[in-house]
Amino acid sequence: MEAVMHATTTVRPKRSAGFALLSPAVLILLVWSIVPLLLTLWYSFRNYNLVDPTLQGFAGINNYWYLLTDPDFLQSLLNTLILVVGVLAISVGGGTLLAVLYDQDFFGRGIARVLVISPFFVMPTVSALLWKNLMLHPIYGVYSSMMRAVGLTPIDWLQRFPMATIMMIVAWEWLPFAVLILLTAVQSLDSEQKEAARMDGAGAIAQFRYIILPHLSRAITVVVMIETIYLLTIFAEISVTTAGGPGVASTNLAFLIYSRALLQFDVGGASAGGVIAIVIANIVAAFLVRAVARNLEA
């Protein structure tokens, strides 16, 4: 009994000391996250316009009603959905195929792996400028030169196909992340399973469908979850390339909030958009976390 009491009294000071050491970090994180959220929620119910400081007071749900009934808001939601789904399809699909390819033994495999992963380390703003001015420029871009070389008329990609072009740029940035995660998962697959399937007469397509894809299901779920959370907040690529245009053809929810706050100076409306974006992001994250948990349990 004395030994148990001594152990209990020893554990309590250790827990107290650990809490005392962790409490400053926890407090800083709470202040850092809760205070901006509370201020955003507060301003979303206020009349606050930087152009007209005299316009103040409680707005109720007017900011939310104006935003939800605005056609630009619905278009931005649709653009956000198209961007997220398109980039996920390209990065996950292409990442799976490249991961299987780079798992094979061929000459220059190390250099190929470095090249395919390197775009992930380029900043989004730099990537957007690179594609806009070097690759896709209708006059002196690389693709325009290639089209003129074969007798075709160059295309102003950002003007004619703004969403598809932004989708391609963002997918180029996130494809290396998918390759890195999925390649690691492919390498963890037991080679004896593939060898046994090969001896049983299974071809490459059958091995990919019945062995590799089921093995990659957990890694694919993790990639989808992480990429989705980040793709909901894509901003730099749109701001640098199209500025949300033409019109609102390439405006997503994040850029719409920015335009309301810093272009139209409507802080109240932008705060309402921020609250709606937070709600949407949390709903999506909740579904993704549950999907990952079910996949891991299976």
Image (tube, rainbow, N blue to C red):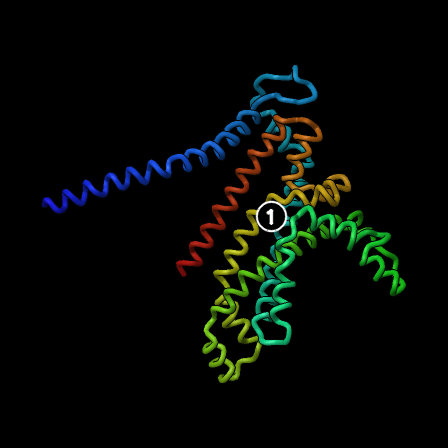
Question: In the rendered image of this protein, does residue 195 appear above or below residue 50?
Answer: below
Q: Residue 204, image x and y in percent?
A: 57, 77
From the viewer's side, name the closer residue of 214 and 10.
10
Badge 1 amino acid: Leu
**Residue behind mark 1:** 231
Question: In the rendered image of this protein, does residue 265 appear above or below residue 127?
Answer: above
Q: Which residue is pictured at 53% across the width and 51% down the height?
A: 226
Query: Which quadrant holds residue 254?
Result: top right
Q: Which residue is pictured at 59% across the width and 30% down the height?
A: 271
Q: Residue 6, image x and y in percent?
A: 15, 43
**Furthest residue toward top:** 54
**Furthest residue toward right:** 151
Disc 1 on helix, strand or loop? Answer: helix
Looking at the image, residue 217 sits to the left or right of residue 14; the answer is right
**Furthest residue toward left:** 1
Q: Residue 50, image x and y in percent?
A: 67, 22
Q: Is residue 87 visible?
A: no
Looking at the image, residue 85 sits to the left or right of residue 152; the answer is left
Q: Is residue 203 visible?
A: yes
- Quadrant (top left, top right, bottom left, bottom right) of the C terminus: bottom left
- Quadrant (top left, top right, bottom left, bottom right) of the N terminus: top left
Q: Which residue is pictured at 69% across the width and 53% down the height?
A: 169
Crowding at dot 1, Cα within 10 Å, few <14 / some 14-19 / many 20+, comes out as: many
